Image (cartoon, helix red, strand yellow):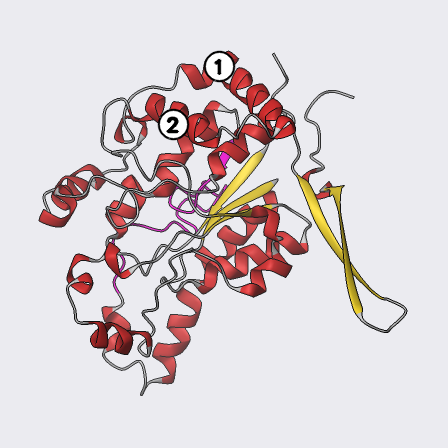
């Protein structure tokens, strides 16, 4: 079996935590909870801002609970300098420990839907790239059809919504700024589980099969098909991946009182009716980050397509592209020298 080159590495999971429908659901049934068991099966240490490591000598430093209230600031935020100063400093421990986890990580996986505000995510992405660490970025499609109440509105009303910040992004194409910061070869429009019922008891085995099936290229593309066959064989020979069973919640660890909070949220009619990830709408990503992770773990560092420009004899701009090895994936070995 091919060596798992991600064995012993560390990954930080970056993405919105505040501007979400429910912080409780986000922690226990959000993308981090779904993805973490797969990463651990690949022997990757997961650094998760929902489950921050304990700091020696500072037991509760930077810990972030699922219940977060801003009521103490709301009464006089705009009229009291001291309130704003406290608002500024109270969150520093969390920012500090999250950025330290970015420092410790070998690579970053980040979820950046274009309809959710998250300045902390951008901060973490930039910090990682300044340290020459690869960032795998998932930017899902955003459609009015994903919101049943909005889908029923007249077309004129939908046009007005764009002027209030709720814009569709049907292809999930991220901001052009990210092209330079992250690199377009690390853009993905989904995780790979968007067409599966995330609460099913056999979720993980169905997921692995689904990701490989959807990634299969046409046989006429011999090079990609050969690589896909290699990845498929590697996954089938991974005892850890084949032994990954159960549902998402089977792999969750609760702190005191959290299980009751989740049980209450699961009774919410909207959550009871939810079957799929990302606005309860099934879709198959054109480019799945999970297949890329399996691809890298099996020993294939994805090439970076570089485009260079030059002037021709007539002074016109011409472009030339070629593939090069992405050396941001140079990982320090944990083996004895």
Q: Which residue is mark 1?
A: 236
Secondary structure found at label 2: helix
Is label 2 or label 1 in front? 2
Q: Position of residue 198 (x, y in %)?
A: 27, 34
Mark linked to residue 25: none
In front here: 228 or 200?
228
For the C terminus, the image quarter is top right
Q: State the separation of the CA atoms marked 2 and 1.
A: 13 Å
* Mark 1 Cα shell of 10 Å, populated few (<14), some (14-19), many (≥20): some
Please provide percent x and percent y for residue 299: 65, 25
Q: Nearer the viewer, residue 60 or 45?
A: 45
Q: Quadrant of residue 256?
A: top left
Q: Nearer the viewer, residue 166 or 27?
A: 166
The answer to whether 163 is drawn above or below residue 297 in the figure is below
Q: Which residue is mark 2?
A: 210
Residue at 53% over, 29% down: 218
The boundaries of the magenta stretch are 45-69
């Amino acid at each position: 079996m091919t060596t798992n080159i991600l064995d012993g590495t560390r990954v930080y999971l970056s993405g919105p935590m505040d501007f979400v429908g429910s912080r409780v659901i986000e922690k226990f049934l959000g993308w981090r909870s779904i993805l973490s068991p797969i990463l651990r099966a690949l022997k990757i240490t997961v650094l998760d801002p929902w489950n921050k490591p304990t700091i020696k000598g500072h037991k509760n430093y930077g810990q972030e609970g699922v219940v977060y209230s801003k009521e103490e600031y709301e009464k006089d935020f705009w009229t009291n300098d001291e309130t704003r100063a406290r608002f500024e400093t109270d969150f520093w421990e969390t920012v500090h420990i999250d950025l330290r986890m970015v420092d410790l990580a070998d690579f970053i996986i980040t979820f950046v839907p274009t309809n959710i505000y998250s300045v902390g995510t951008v901060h973490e992405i930039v910090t990682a790239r300044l340290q020459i660490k690869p960032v795998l970025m998932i930017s899902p499609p955003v459609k009015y059809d994903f919101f049943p109440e909005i889908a029923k509105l007249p077309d004129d009303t939908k046009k007005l919504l764009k002027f209030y910040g709720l814009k569709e992004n049907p292809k999930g194409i991220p901001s052009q700024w990210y092209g330079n910061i992250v690199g377009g070869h690390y853009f993905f429009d989904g995780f790979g589980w968007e067409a599966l019922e995330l609460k099913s008891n056999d979720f993980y085995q169905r997921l692995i099969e689904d990701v490989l099936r959807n990634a299969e290229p046409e046989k006429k593309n011999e090079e990609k098909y050969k690589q896909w066959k290699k990845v498929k064989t590697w996954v089938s020979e991974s005892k850890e991946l084949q032994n990954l069973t159960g549902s998402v919640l089977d792999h969750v660890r609760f702190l005191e009182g959290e299980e009751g909070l989740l049980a209450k949220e699961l009774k919410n009619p909207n959550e009871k009716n939810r079957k799929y990830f990302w606005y309860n709408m099934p879709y198959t990503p054109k480019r799945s980050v999970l297949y890329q992770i399996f691809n890298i773990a099996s020993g294939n560092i994805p090439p970076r397509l570089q485009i260079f420009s030059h002037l021709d004899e007539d002074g016109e701009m011409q472009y030339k592209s070629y593939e090069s090895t992405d050396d941001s994936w140079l990982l320090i070995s944990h083996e004895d020298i």
